[in-house]
Amino acid sequence: MRKFKIGDRVLCVKAFEDNHHIVNQTGTIIGHWGDRTWTVEFDNSIWGHDGSGGGGRVIGRDKHCWNTNEDCLRFAGLKEVKIYGIVKFLEGIKA
């Protein structure tokens, strides 16, 4: 079973693939790659990419996304999140 799902709010607790800009940044899971790697759209620019994965379909803000191993991520608190044009509210703080 996967630790996260698309729409989860996360906090990055360590660098992944030498990107130290993601440490202590919060964001939203917007995609999944393989068994344990997630695409996160961070709230702030982390000098990343747009989450398209080279497929041409942009799913996040440019320079705000990074594919990150789940060992680097922890659940964050509540925030209003816009997914596919529908506003949803994440319920509770997951620990």
Image: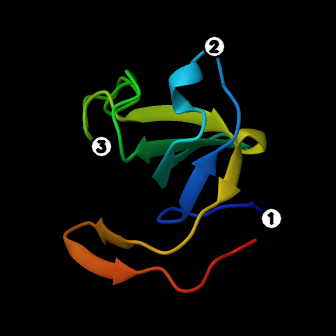
Quarter occupied by residue 4: bottom right
Report, in whole angstroms, how far the alpha carbon at label 2 lies from the one at label 3.
21 Å
Q: Nearer the viewer, mark 3 or mark 1?
A: 3
Label placed on residue 18: 2
The residue at 40%/35% (across/down) is 65
Q: From this viewpoint, which residue is outermost toward the left?
A: 85
Question: Which picture quadrant has residue 86?
Answer: bottom left
The answer to which of marks 2 and 3 sits earlier in the sequence is 2
The tag on residue 60 is 3
Residue 1: numbered disc:
1
Q: Which of the two labelled residues, at mark 3 and mark 1, occupies the earlier sequence position? A: 1
Q: Amino acid at mark 1?
A: Met
Q: Secondary structure at mark 1?
A: loop
What is the secondary structure assignment of the residue under circle 3?
Answer: loop
What is the three-letter code of the residue carrying label 2? Answer: Asp
- Observer able to see residue 41: yes
Q: Is residue 75 above or below residue 16?
A: below
Q: Local crowd at mark 1 within 10 Å, few (<14), some, or many (≥20)? A: few
Indicate whether 52 appears above or below 32. above
Pinpoint residue 2: horizontal percent, then vertical percent.
Answer: 74, 60
Res 30 seen here: no
Kindly identify the amino acid type of the residue bearing the numbered disc 3. Gly
Q: Residue at x 48, y 44 (%)?
A: 40
| Quarter of the C terminus within the rendering | bottom right
What separation in Å lies between label 3 and label 1 (alpha carbons)?
25 Å
Point out the tag, 1 or 2, that comes first from the N-terminus: 1
Q: Secondary structure at mark 2?
A: loop
Look at the numbered discs 1 and 2 and tell me whether their residues touch, using CB distance below 8 Å: no
